Image (tube, grey):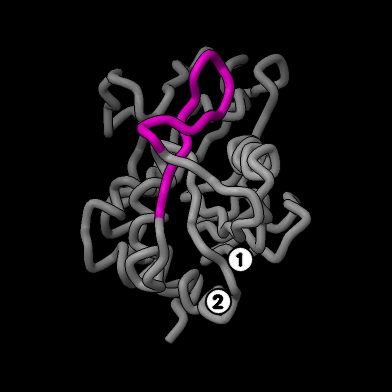
Amino acid sequence: MSLTDKEVLEIFNKTEALLNGHFLLTSGRHSDKYFQCAKVLQYPKYNELICKNIADYFKNFEFNAIVCPAIGGIVVGQEIARQLGKRFIFTERENNSMTLRRGFKISPGEKILVCEDVVTTGGSVFEVIDLVKQNGANVVGVGFIVDRSNGKVNFGYSQYSVIKMEVITYLKEDCPLCKKGIEVVKPGSRKTIDKKKLDIKK
């Protein structure tokens, strides 16, 4: 049974994974909201439940392997691969380029499902798609948990997100939070997040 948006948000709030504050996103843009999927995915029961929505959507697609960008997509891709009985590998950024390491290979002619945790501009996913093509393989679809663009990002393949949300992002020079002098935080970095300052939702 598919989760509703309300049920997904309840899980995010319960695990304190939906943050409010001033954040620097991977895309380089700023936002007052951040989805820290790792806070949800640390619980196997929630990971299995949420990823089942993506697995169910793509279960009748023909593909050989699942490829995800590190780090956020790893837990998602591994769980979907487990549920569908597929091979799983991940890409890493090296010298500012998405690449395959650790002996991972994508063979010409393979059919690939690309997965991710959160999509804002889709930059990392587009890089993975390009890498798949460079290796002579074919993308069959893209699956991810949170679509922060509310459907605005189109990867050019069949795509599915568990939840869509319209989250406003800003260029640094246009960011009203910067203009107010509110400290910016890059989630996932070693910098400790002050829960009181960031008003984490319960």
Q: Is residue 93 magenta?
A: yes
Residue 30 percent across, percent down from the top left: 59, 27
Name the kind of residue labelled 1 in the image.
Tyr
Vertical arrangement, residue 196 with respect to residue 11, above or below: above
State which quadrant residue 135 falls in: top right
Question: Which residues, given as a range, are shown in magenta?
Answer: 88-103
From where the camera sits, is residue 178 visible?
yes
Identified at 48% across, 33% down, the residue is 100
- Give the side of residue 120 with respect to residue 187, left or right: right
State which quadrant residue 195 falls in: top left
- Give the side of residue 110 with respect to residue 4, left or right: right
Q: Which residue is mark 1?
A: 160
Callout 2 environment at 10 Å: few (<14), some (14 to 19), or many (20+)? some
Q: Is residue 113 magenta?
A: no
Identified at 49% across, 25% down, the residue is 93
Label the magenta part by its dominant secondary structure.
strand
State which quadrant residue 102 falls in: top left
Q: Is 152 or 92 nearer to us in this picture? A: 92
The quarter of the picture where the N terminus appears is bottom left
Q: Is 139 or 119 nearer to us in this picture? A: 139
Vertical arrangement, residue 120 with respect to residue 170, above or below: below
Q: Is 179 or 92 nearer to us in this picture? A: 92
- Give the side of residue 161 with respect to residue 81, left or right: right
Q: Which residue is mark 2?
A: 57
SS type, badge 2: helix
Callout 1 environment at 10 Å: few (<14), some (14 to 19), or many (20+)? many
SS type, badge 1: strand
Identified at 64% across, 62% down, the residue is 141
Name the kind of residue labelled 2 in the image.
Tyr
Residue 189 percent across, percent down from the top left: 34, 22
- The disc, 2 or 1, on the residue closer to the chain's N-terminal end is 2
